[in-house]
């Protein structure tokens, strides 16, 4: 991912991002959660999040992945959990900033 980011190769970065998440899901050995994530959550997030022509919307994502991986490698479940929670919260915040919720269920309107 770091090489793809340095090269500005958004398509490769996205592929490696998906691979990272797939490997984390496999390592967790939580089949029910993995099926749910694969069938609903991840595709929805990525569809909203990624425009392969634009730079990655969250510059800190790669460092968040590194923190998750480091915690796993050092077999520190508390750190891994904290890093993953931070990653998810940051992604959620990024999505909300990029796609603010509708007020009263109506699209943005010009003031009268």
Image: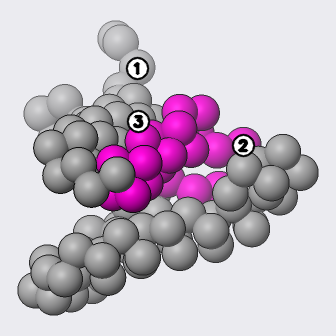
Which residue is found at the position 64% from the left and 44% from the top? 56
Residue 46 coordinates in the image, percent (x, y): 46, 63
Task: Using the rendered view, name the quadrant where residue 34 is placed.
Answer: bottom left
**Residue that lies at the very extreme toward the right in this rendered image:** 7
- Above or below 12: residue 92: above
Which disc is residue 110 wearing? 1
The answer to whether residue 88 is magenta is: no
The answer to whether residue 63 is magenta is: yes
- Above or below 96: residue 24: below
Q: Is residue 84 visible?
A: no
- The crowding category of the residue bearing disc 3, from other C-alpha atoms within 10 Å (few below 14, some 14 to 19, many at least 20), is some
SS assignment at label 3? helix
SS assignment at label 1? loop
- The crowding category of the residue bearing disc 1, from other C-alpha atoms within 10 Å (few below 14, some 14 to 19, many at least 20), is few
The quadrant of the image that shows the N terminus is bottom right
Which residue is found at the position 64% from the left and 72% from the top? 15
Query: How far apart are labels 1 and 2 at the CA level?
Result: 30 Å
Of labels 3 and 2, earlier in sequence is 2
Which disc is residue 94 wearing? 3
Which residue is found at the position 32% from the left and 82% from the top? 26
Residue 47 coordinates in the image, percent (x, y): 47, 65
Which disc is residue 55 wearing? 2
Residue stretch rendered in magenta on the structure: 49-73
Along the line of sight, which residue is nearer the eye, 20 or 76?
76
């Amino acid at each position: 991912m770091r090489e793809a980011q340095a090269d500005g190769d958004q398509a490769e970065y996205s592929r490696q991002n998906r691979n990272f998440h797939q490997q984390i899901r496999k390592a967790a050995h939580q089949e029910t959660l993995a099926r749910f994530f694969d069938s609903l959550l991840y595709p929805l997030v990525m569809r909203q999040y990624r425009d392969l022509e634009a730079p990655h919307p969250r510059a800190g994502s790669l460092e968040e992945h590194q923190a998750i991986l480091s915690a796993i490698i050092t077999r520190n479940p508390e750190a891994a959990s904290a890093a993953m929670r931070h990653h998810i919260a940051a992604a959620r915040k990024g999505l909300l900033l990029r796609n603010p919720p509708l007020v009263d269920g109506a699209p943005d309107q010009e003031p009268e």
